[in-house]
Image (cartoon, helix red, strand yellow):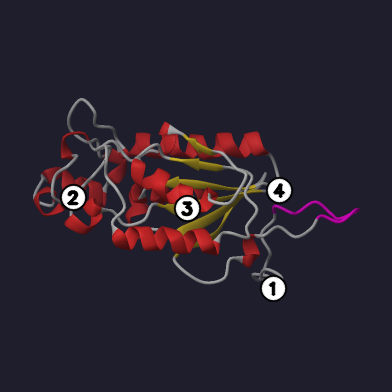
Amino acid sequence: MTTVILLRHGRTTANAGGILAGWTPGVQLDEAGQAQVAAVGERLAKVPLAAVVSSPLERCVQTASAVTAGRDLELRTDDRLGEARYGDWTGRAIKELVKEPLWKVVQQHPSAAVFPGDEGEGLAQTQARAVAAVRAVNAELGPDAVWLACSHGDVIKAVLADALGLHLDQFQRIVVDPASISVVTYTETRPFVARINDTGGDVSALIPAPRKRGRRKASSDAVVGGGAGAPS
């Protein structure tokens, strides 16, 4: 059972200004975003992480660096966790984009949405590469590992939709706020989605229990009736 903590970057100047940043270089966290990532770094400080892998974009590297601070852990980057490639929409104001015919497709049928321009990609492509990245790191780290992936709102929503078994056309039902964590545990049978859009509170359940000799392998079965939850 490999657990990934999906961390969205903190609020940026583009978020605050209503601009679709995409892969625009140099987009930084604003003052509120810096406070958000400092807080999430403190929240996760006691969670042992086998790896921290980030989108290469500055806002994610800034956010992930708050998690690796004080740890003997290299921050890795992976383009597959990068923002959706919005093509000609990149850098434009959201209030303008809502008037585009493609906006309704993105909202109602995102699996068919392909962003315009030579650099644009489809949201289905975004999902495929992001899920592939997560599963590749899962395979690399093996069972019992807990690791963190720092990415972007639409990318994390797409990974969560896959883990929930939802068609991509349903991914707009998921909310992923700046500096929120979402948690997925991958088993041989299925993923279990433990948290979505968590912006505060206790994270001790993410700390693996000590492995005892003779302890049974963790089951990948769902508990009928819901179970008792994580040990208190």
Q: Residue at x 26, y 37 (%)?
A: 25
Provide the major secondary structure of the magenta segment: loop
Is residue 33 found left or right of 213 in the rendered image?
left
Q: Which circle marks residue 144 in the picture?
A: 4
Which callout, 1 or 3, points at the residue further toward the start of the chain?
3
Q: Secondary structure at mark 3?
A: helix
**Residue to which mark 2 is pinned:** 19
Farthest residue to the right: give it.
214
**Residue to which mark 3 is pinned:** 66
Q: Secondary structure at mark 2?
A: loop
**Residue to which mark 1 is pinned:** 228
Q: What are the residue bounds of the magenta stretch?
A: 211-220
Q: Nearer the viewer, mark 4 or mark 2?
A: 2
Q: Secondary structure at mark 1?
A: loop
Q: Nearer the viewer, mark 1 or mark 2?
A: 2
Which callout, 3 or 4, points at the residue further toward the start of the chain?
3
